């Protein structure tokens, strides 16, 4: 099942993608829901980020090859960080290149969408709380990550967490291809079987620290091949069994009340 969040006729709704049409559901997909009986052509709606999470939990250096390419060792325990909900954008939305930032990198990833409240989950039960999976781009201001000594600013700019295009619920996440293309050129290519820690292990670790709520997002880590983006670039993250998340990079607009260059 593919769950979409979309805008149509000035309303934001959830629905199930069925071929070229969307079947709206009520009240939401994080519990029992009902079909409204309507069908809307998918071409008539704007797809939005599939969730608006209370938090996005990222995982650093979870592919050994990516850790090595940045001169790091694979950590003995997961490195987790937070991206604010205001970083989330949807498919087709722009990634804004902030003024004063020297380097902005793409990081294609498999994202986990939480469906149930989870706290101190055992690894054996952790997947029971997963609603589904989507594509993510953990956009990062690489120079700020290096100079700040922690990652909040580098990972937290508005638009630095594209998600989508939908939530795929019927998926085994253990061995999926993850690819990133920039301007149609392949940049990243790996498989989730190469994750140092899989989804269940990550959820168990994260919920030993914090409660995950329905709609929260866990980014599982990016493979080797990360690199810089430039204004005008089109970046696509593809996860096998899910789909393709595409976004364009734009320059930061002038602040309100301030003339442009």
Image (cartoon, grey):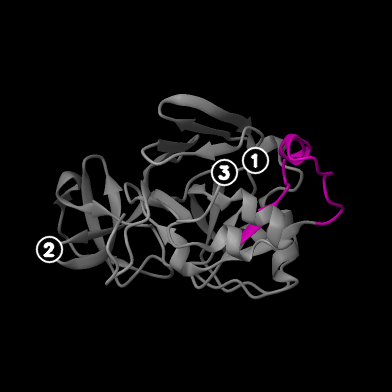
Q: Which residue is mark 2?
A: 9
Instruction: Report helix, strand or loop for mark 1.
Output: loop
Say whether disc 2 or disc 1 marks the residue closer to the N-terminus. Answer: 2
Residue extending farthest to the right is 76
Q: Is residue 137 visible?
A: yes
Q: Is disc 3 surrounded by few (<14), some (14 to 19) or many (20+) residues within 10 Å?
A: many
Residue mark closest to the camera, 3 vs 1: 3
Q: CA distance from mark 3 to mark 1?
A: 19 Å
Q: Which residue is mark 1?
A: 174
**What label sits on residue 107 in the rendered view?**
3
Magenta-drawn segment: 57-77
* Residue 155 percent across, percent down from the top left: 57, 58
Q: Is residue 241 left or right of residue 172?
A: left
* Residue 123 percent across, percent down from the top left: 74, 59
* Residue 21 percent across, percent down from the top left: 20, 46
Classify 225 as above or below 173: above
Q: Is residue 124 visible?
A: no
Q: CA distance from mark 2 to mark 3?
A: 33 Å
Q: CA distance from mark 2 to mark 1?
A: 39 Å
Residue mark closest to the camera, 2 vs 3: 3
Q: Is residue 42 left or right of residue 151?
A: left
* Residue 118 percent across, percent down from the top left: 63, 72
């Amino acid at each position: 099942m593919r769950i979409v969040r979309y805008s149509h006729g000035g309303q934001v709704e959830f629905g199930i993608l069925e071929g070229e049409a969307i079947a709206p559901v009520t009240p939401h997909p994080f519990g029992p829901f009902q079909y409204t009986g309507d069908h809307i052509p998918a071409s008539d709606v704007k797809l939005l980020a599939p969730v608006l999470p209370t938090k996005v939990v990222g995982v650093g250096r979870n592919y050994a090859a990516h850790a090595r390419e940045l001169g790091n060792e694979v950590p003995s325990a997961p490195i987790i960080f937070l991206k604010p909900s205001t970083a989330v954008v949807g498919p087709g939305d722009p990634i804004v290149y902030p003024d004063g930032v020297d380097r902005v990198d793409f990081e294609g990833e498999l994202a986990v969408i939480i469906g149930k409240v989870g706290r101190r989950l055992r690894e054996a039960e952790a997947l029971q709380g997963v609603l589904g999976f989507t594509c993510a781009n953990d956009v990062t201001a690489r120079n700020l990550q290096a100079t700040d000594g922690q990652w909040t600013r580098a990972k937290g700019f508005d638009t630095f967490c594209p998600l989508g295009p939908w939530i795929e619920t019927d998926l085994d996440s253990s061995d999926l291809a993850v690819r990133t293309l920039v301007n149609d050129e392949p940049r990243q290519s790996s498989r989730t079987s190469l994750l140092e820690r899989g989804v269940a292990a990550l959820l168990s670790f994260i919920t030993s620290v914090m409660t995950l709520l329905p709609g929260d997002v866990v980014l599982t880590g990016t493979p080797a091949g990360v690199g810089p983006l430039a204004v005008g670039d089109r970046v696509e993250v593809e996860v096998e069994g899910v789909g393709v998340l595409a976004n364009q990079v734009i320059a930061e607009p002038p602040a309100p009340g301030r003339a442009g260059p």
